[in-house]
Image: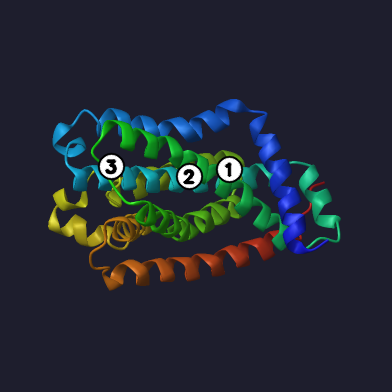
Amino acid sequence: MSTIRLATVHAKYSLLETMRVPIAVIGALVFPALSLLFFVVPQKAVAGDPVFATQAVISMSVFAVMANSLFNFGISISEDREKPWDPYLRTLPVPGMSRVLGYVFSIGLMGIVAILPVIAIGALFTEAEASVGRIALGLLALATSALPFMLIGICIGYSMPAKAAIAVVQIVMFGFAFAGGLFYPPQLFAPWLNSLSMFFPSRQARELVIWAVQGGELEPWVWLGLIVWTAVLLAVALVLFKRDEGRRYR
């Protein structure tokens, strides 16, 4: 079997295992949607303005993908490493990349599902607007900007036990969300905080998706920052994966 075929098999059973715990799926779907419903929809100045409402929906979509990537990669990998089944899988003549891609496929699908309620609430209860072509381009930008968050989750999962991973993921998620302008528009930041937030992948992801959906000028710091974050985190993730490759449980 090819690496891709093995990855799809691994993704299939990962999804089946996740579906056996419905609250895990419900949490991924509900939290970003409720954030939009409670914090954006009641604010008529935002929800009633097409530009601001569209940006708010984009911010919550980025948050949904970020939270899904951090939690599922970080916690799933760290939990798998503590199970007796994991050392057995490592003894099989299967490339490790197939397991990593399996995580990408299964968690990526969950990320797509997580943004659907956000888009539905934005379409029904706000003045957010975008053409079909712009929405498709925005989804492509969203998938591209999710790479740093996936890699951060992989680094967390392969570097610490599950109990520590849960705490670290929560700190990283909310820190990136606030600093990246996902909960609070960066236009209202103090100048020093606005400058600092430009170095966060969450802010870069937000600006990339806004550019894809609403158009305008794409600042170089947006795409350069995402490239740097992805390259550095990929190198770190590979080092951590190779370090953990010979790990065995007694």
Instruction: Give the labeled residue for mark 2.
Output: 169
- The amino acid marked with disc number 2 is Val
- The amino acid marked with disc number 1 is Ile
Which residue is located at x 33 percent, y 47 percent? 58
Instruction: Give the labeled residue for mark 1.
Output: 75
Q: Secondary structure at mark 1?
A: helix
Instruction: Give the labeled residue for mark 3.
Output: 183
Which residue is located at x 16 percent, y 52 percent? 187
Spot the residue most to the front.
132
Tell me if residue 238 can be seen.
Answer: yes
Answer left or right for 110 relative to 187.
right
Residue nearest the observer in this picture, 200 or 15 = 15
Residue nearest the observer in this picture, 176 or 99 = 99
Q: Nearer the N terminus, badge 2 or badge 3? A: 2
Q: Is residue 25 above or below residue 211?
A: above
Q: What colour scheme has been applied to the protein in the rendered image?
A: rainbow
Query: x, y (%) of residue 200?
Result: 34, 59
Q: Nearer the N terminus, badge 1 or badge 3? A: 1
Q: Secondary structure at mark 3?
A: loop
Question: Could you classify mark 1 by the number of other residues whose Cα lies within 10 Å: few (under 14), some (14-19), or many (20 or more)?
Answer: many
Q: Work out how far the residue at label 2 is from the one at label 3, CA to CA, in angstroms.
A: 17 Å
Query: x, y (%) of residue 165?
Result: 54, 44
Q: Secondary structure at mark 2?
A: helix
